[in-house]
Image (cartoon, rainbow, N blue to C red):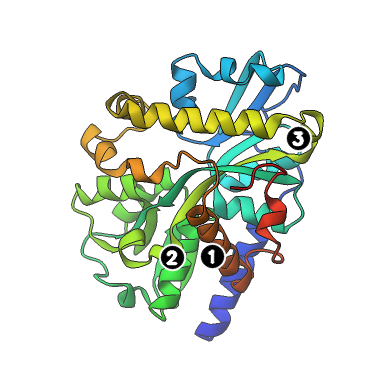
Amino acid sequence: MPRKKLRTSVRLVVAAALLLLGGTLTACSSKASGATSDTLRVGYIGPTDKLTGTLGYLQEKNELVGQLSKLGVKKIKTYGFANGPDLNQALASGDLDVGLYGDTPAIVARAAGQKTRLVGQSTINLDAEIVTKKGGPSSLKELDGQTVAVAKGSYMHRYLLGALDDAKVTPEQVLNIPTADTAAALAKGQIAAAALPIANAEALRAQGYPVIDGLVKDHPDYAGTSVEVVTQSYLDNHKNFVKVWQALHKHAATEAKANWSDYLSFAHTLAKFPPAIIDATTLKDTIPVQPLTAEGLKLLQGTQDFLVEEKLAAKPFDIDDWIAPGAKP
C-alpha cells in the first residue's frame, strides 16, 4: 500500500475509535451509576481509586463535599477511567455529571454532538515525550515506516501525530496501547517508539530508554490541557453550578500552591514513580488559579484546529459556545 494511503487509513481507523461514544459502557465505567439529587458523580483519568489533581487534594483533606454544599451535594462518587474515550462514553450514557480529563477526547466528544459544557481547565501546558526502544531510532526521522504507539484519544496522541507531521514522517502503524502497557511493548521490541506523559517517559529514561523528542520543549503549540466539563442536564438542574464549581477550582488551586510540599506528598500516592520524578514533572505553573485563562483557551483552539484538520474531530465548533454561561474569563 502506498505510504500516503496507509497514513490516511490509519487516521480513519483512529477517528472511528475516537468518535465511538454510544453503546454499552466498558467494565471500567459501568460502575458509574445511581444518580441521586444529593450525589455528584465525577469521572477522572487515573491509575488509582483516588481522585487526582488539586480536587483530589481537597478530597484527601475531606474538604471537597463542604465546598460543594451550596449545590445540595452531600456525597461525591468518583470513578477512575483508563482513557478519555471511556470517560466520554460514561458521560454520554448519563452515568457521570462531571468529567475531568484531557482536552483532546473532550473536544472530540463535543464535536460529535455530546452535550457537555466547559467550566474550567485544571492544568495547562501538559508535557509529554517520545521514547524509543533501546538501540532503536535516535530521531523522529528514523520513525519513518516504523510502528509507534500512543494511548489514542489522549493529548499525547495529538502531540505524536503533530510531531511526526512536522518531521514529514509517516509511520507504518500507530497502535493504541495504554500508557501502562507501553514499557513492555518497548522492551519486547513490538514498537519502535511511543508518546508518553512526561512522568512515564522520564521513568523509562531512568531505565536507559532514549527520549528523542519533548512536547513543551520541541512543540509548545501542541501542549495539552486538562478540562473540567459538566453535562448540560446537570447544569440545567443546578443553576448555580458554575459559580460554585469555579469557586471550588480557585480554592483547590490556591491551596495546592500554598502548600506545595504537602501537595507533592499527595501526588506521590497517585502513581508508582520515584518521588524525585513526580516532583520534577509536577509544576506549579501548569496549575491555573483562574478556571479559564486566555492561554488555556488558546491551547484548546489549537487542539481543535489540529483534530479537525486531521479528521479526528467530526466538525469545528465555537469554543466560546462550549463554555458554560457565566464561566468565561
Residue identifier under label 3: 235
Residue 48 can be seen, yes or no? no
Work out whether residue 301 or residue 214 is closer to the camera in this orientation and state it: 301
Q: Earlier in the sequence, mark 3 or mark 2?
A: 2
For this rendering, which residue is in front, 320 or 199? 320
Disc 3 + disc 1, Cβ < 8 Å: no
Q: CA distance from mark 2 to mark 1?
A: 7 Å
Circle 1: residue type:
Gly
Horizontal and vertical percent position of residue 44 = 55, 35
User: Viewer-proximal residue, 62 or 183?
Assistant: 62
Which SS class for mark 1?
helix
Question: Which residue is at a point 26% across and 48% down the rendered structure image?
Answer: 202
* Residues under numbered marks 2 and 1 in contact, where contact means CB atoms less than 8 Å apart: yes
What SS does tag 2 mark? Answer: helix
Residue situated in front as seen by the camera: 61 or 108 = 61
Name the residue located 24 percent from the left edge and 34 percent from the top edge.
274
Going by the image, does 257 lie left or right of 67?
left
Q: Could you tell me which residue is drawn at 74 percent across and 21 percent down?
A: 34
| Amino acid under disc 2 | Asp
| Amino acid type assigned to the residue bearing label 3 in the image | Leu
Q: Which residue is mark 2?
A: 221
The earlier-in-sequence mark between 2 and 1 is 2
Residue 328, above or below 29: below
> Which residue in the structure is indicated by mark 1?
302
The image quarter in which residue 42 lies: top right
Outermost residue to the bottom? 2
Tell me the distance, in whole angstroms, between the alpha carbons under discs 3 and 1: 27 Å
Give the x, y percent position of residue 149: 43, 59
The quarter of the displayed image where residue 90 is located? top right
